[in-house]
Amino acid sequence: MSWQYGSFARRNNVCSLFGLLLLLVVFAGCGGTNTPALTPTPTSFSTQSTLLDLGLPEKALAAPVIGQVPASQVLHVAITFNINQALLDQLGQNTTVKQGNSQDVASLANSLGISDQTYAKIKAYFGVENATLKLSKLHTNLTIDAKTSTFAKLLQTNFVIHRLANRTFYTPDPQHMPQLPGFIASTITAITGLDNYSIAPAVQSFALSQQHKHMQSGQAANADCTPDPQTLVPTQIAHAYNYDQFWKLGWAGENTIINLIEVDGFSNSDISNYFACAHFRGKLDVVNVDGARPQPGGESTLDLDMIAGLAPAAHIVDYETDTSNSALSDSWTRVNDELQQLINNNTKNTGAINTVSMSLGTPEDGFTLGNIRAMHQSFEILTKVEHMTVLAASGDCAAFMSHVFNQLAVSYPASDTDAVGVGGTQMSTDIQGVVNGEAVWADGSDTSNCHNQWGSGGGLSTLFQRQTWQNAAGVQNRFSNGKRQVPDIAAVSFDIAVYFGGQWVSDGGTSAATPIWAAGLSLVNEGLAQKKHVFIYGPSIFYAVANHPGNVHPYHDVTSGNNLFYPATPGWDYSTGLGTPDLVSFFLVLFRNVK
């Protein structure tokens, strides 16, 4: 699947029933994508005002105004507080963790995020009434829900609707941008929800195509277990990547958790049918975030099917939020709410094998810097504090995640330095269905419009620098410019059997590749926990494995094809990263090297 990705005079009377909501306005002093190292504590209640900078591009603020946001509309706004970067880095300094050795990181909240004392001073200074507030367990994120009229009064602005390039979005009035006391601004890294300029997330998979077939009985408690023979089923994928060798050892995802971040729902009957066919014996929990469950869609179905088919004993936790009505809310704030809920749910679970699979995204230039900074901090916390590996689909519009052919762009969050970007391949099979090769998944037959079918996303970030850990054969190449390079790894993304809408269909995209890798990493960590009582996490491990292979080959190096711009080459490349998994060899490298 694929996804997409002025001033007023200072107020003399800042006391207000809703003054705390001014917190939401703070975004000043947030240069770059890194959060400040320490959380400052205000020593005085200076009323000097600071103008809000939401990180909106000039073209957004200059776009024609076509109306106003209704005064009664409730805005869902989130602030991301400065984090103690030194403590964050200390918590994440080792990429090997002893299984079961969990720490209650919520006990570090006053040191990691905003302190109780600072929060109390802010509330005492502004007062709190008529608002719904939720402070995260780690004191790094605060959400506030209030009417537009409330925010407008407190921030001395209005909220207007713009039209730009056939899309509409709201922002504060560009002629009267909000302001707030400077001491609050010094505690904030990002604020989101006061605008919805960022392009709503789209799933990273191509359109589902239905296959004609008839129902069969007598299989897996009368489940329909006969997909089209031309599509790939889990046993074929598992055999191609050696997942089935782990099954033979009794490692099928037991005592592992795989978390899915979704913006659509699923049909219980569809999932039950697939689970029966895959003999899934794990556990599925659904966590609804921010209200009503979203309608069933292809993305959640695909992700659940891939995990159930390849890690059939795993505990799957499906986080859902509804972003279908993005006209008057910021969709990515709600996606970050899912990440924050995931963080809150695992503050006592840092010694558990936990993986995150995220098949959502938008072109990097489709975001405000506020959304990028907020989610980047969430990914840092998930990785460094809670010891999870976050895998993100690289997108399905090939090298042009802009959705414009020949306009190079990559997708976020796959480009985040605390995420593992996952690209896609296409497998070839013989007449018996045995896989005998892989090439880059790409289709340049119709470049007029990308319907999530141009192929494996990849290229160079415009936002993030390349990290020192992104270093392996092929990484330094003629296209390299010092920026983060995407993807890191890849897996099959084409013609995969999925049960959707009461029948078997062919589906794919990097949305399939991402949960395939999430399942594989869970099996590897289960094996490491069984043999060495440890597990590994984070994006750097994939390059460490590539650089210490010994006498085995942990990746299938894909050297055939291109993503319509970048060719597949020996070693790392912009189409398939380091390659697709040979899971047994991947495990052996880690088994020999981790302590």
Image (spheres, rainbow, N blue to C red):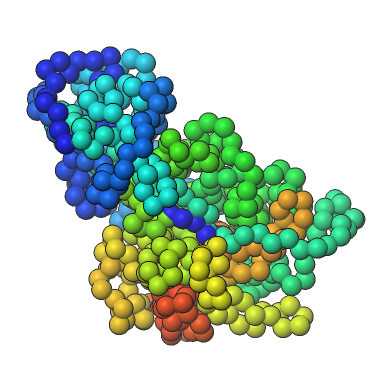
Viewed as shown, does residue 268 lie left or right of 89? right
Q: Position of residue 577 (x, y in %)?
A: 43, 73
Tell me which residue sits at (22%, 19%) in the image.
126
Q: Position of residue 280 (x, y in %)?
A: 71, 53
Instruction: Name the image quarter holding the C terminus.
Output: bottom left
Between 557 and 400, the residue placed more toward the observer is 400
Viewed as shown, does residue 565 lie left or right of 205? left
Q: Position of residue 545 (x, y in %)?
A: 42, 72
Instruction: Name the image quarter holding the N terminus.
Output: bottom right
State whether residue 54 appears in this view. yes
Q: Quadrant of residue 493?
A: bottom right
Between 1 and 62, the residue placed more toward the observer is 62
Between 76 and 526, the residue placed more toward the observer is 76
Tell me which residue sits at (74%, 72%) in the image.
230
* Figure check: 341 above or below 253: above
Tell me which residue sits at (26%, 64%) in the image.
465
* Figure check: 373 above or below 466: above
Q: Quadrant of residue 412?
A: bottom left
* Figure check: 289 above or below 547: above
| Residue at the extreme right | 218
Tell me which residue sits at (55%, 62%) in the image.
451
Q: Position of residue 361 (x, y in %)?
A: 45, 55
* Figure check: 538 above or below 119: below
Between 590 and 460, the residue placed more toward the observer is 460
